[in-house]
Amino acid sequence: MSEPADKPFAVGRGSSRARSWRVFQAELAESFFMAFGALVAHKLRSALTLLGVLVGVFSIIVVMTAMRAMQHQIESDLSSLSSQTFMVQKWPAVHFGGPGGEEKYRRRKDLTLPQGLAVMRKATLAQAVGVEAQFPGGEMISQYGKAPPNMTLQGETPGSFAAQNWVLQDGRILQDVEVEGAHDVCVLAAGLRKELFPFGSPVGEKVKFNGITFTVVGVLEPKGAMEGGNQDNFAIIPITTALNRYGNLQQNITIAVLAPSRDQYEETVDQVRGILRTLRKVEPGADDDFEIFSGESILSQINAFTWAVRIGITAISSIALLAAGIGIMNIMLVSVTERTREIGIRRAIGAKKRNIMAQFIMEAVMLCELGGLLGVVVGIIAGNLAAHAMHLSAVIPFDWVFLGLFICSLVGVVFGTYPAYKAANLDPIESLRYE
């Protein structure tokens, strides 16, 4: 008996909800088109008003795009390092302390080849230890081609190949006897091999670097591009050969260490730290006079720095958006005054207060969103042009794009509400008399 009585009520309630939803959609569409028509009717005023929003959003997006491109490239470069690898060198990998902080590192003694070789002998926990020194590029030629001038020469030991995660494509790595005897042999990165030997295997062939002839014994698999150059554009020679030919035995070096596992990573770091503190006669309780870092630690430092920059840029840009919001409120108040009679006519023919408010809030939001969209487009283009100038890949920071457009909507609602409220509460009779 109760079911038949309930069914008409349920149907009626569902039908009422559907009707209310259709009315809401119609009112929203009407508000949108009326707001759009008002903006089109005052093109110059609308353009000048949204310019402030454009500048605020542009300043956020251009910086975030460039920073995201740099961050992606750094992450790509560091991804070649194993999560079990750490580096030891005189200078920190990332330093934001300014010129004053650099003096502290400059006063440190260089890490030398004998210290690096001692770590190789004594670091019993390490799976591999490599000692390296990097030298500026020069002219490397073969009988088939010539290397680009931005190539680099790296002096290495055999342990560097495992520590740096270098994988052979052809030939072999350096041998201990070649390091001990300072032999003139080299291993080519994939990009350099392509330039010097485009048509065949270079193993066993001769190349010349700054007038000195080297025998190619191996080729590395390609890694890809990196900031400011090419990760595949270098040659590896024994570190003793490099220091004898292009430097000296007391020249600053870097030590790369591969821990046997993540579980033994910290233990390996502590062992290497202890060995170096003893070799370099660091007083107990004194700070290390060298830096130990990994790819993860570099990324955490960069992320912390870029986070601070992002917060600063957002705060500065928010001031521009605040000024733009005040400008929008001012223009909307002028618009309400100009359209007083129009509002009175709409109220007289049945428009409710909520319809008037929706129209004017929609107008403010559209102004902000148009300015925001233009700011996003121009910011992404400018940011990627800056990234291209730094030889970085193009990116689109979608999270900041959505955040920027959300803030634009928020500005439109906040600064459009009061003019909309004022318009909705105009007396219809007085509005009709307004000239």
Image: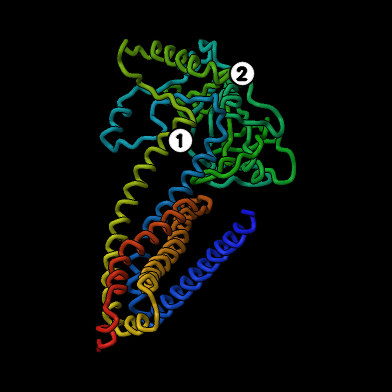
- Relative to 422, residue 198 above or below: above
Depth check, front residue: 224 or 234: 224
Question: For this view, does 397 lie left or right of residue 328?
Answer: right
Residue 113 locus on image (x, y percent): 47, 20
Question: For this view, does 165 lie left or right of residue 48?
Answer: right
Kind of residue at badge 1: Leu
Residue neighbourhood size for the residue with mark 1, other residues' Cα within 10 Å, grouped as few (<14), some (14–19), many (≥20):
some
Mark 1 or 2: in front is 1
Which quadrant of the figure contains the C terminus?
bottom left
Residue 67 locus on image (x, y percent): 43, 48
Depth check, front residue: 6 or 224: 6
SS at mark 1 in the image:
helix
Residue at the disc numbered 2: 176
Residue 280 locus on image (x, y percent): 37, 14
Residue at the disc numbered 1: 299
Depth check, front residue: 211 or 290: 290
Residue 112 locus on image (x, y percent): 43, 21
Kind of residue at badge 2: Asp
* Image quarter of residue 177: top right
Q: Residue at x 41, y 38 (%)?
A: 302
SS at mark 2 in the image:
helix
Q: Residue at x 32, y 29 (%)?
A: 106
Q: Residue at x 49, y 32 (%)?
A: 134
The colour scheme is: rainbow
Q: Name the mark on residue 103.
A: none
Q: Residue furthest front?
A: 1
Can you see residue 331? Answer: no
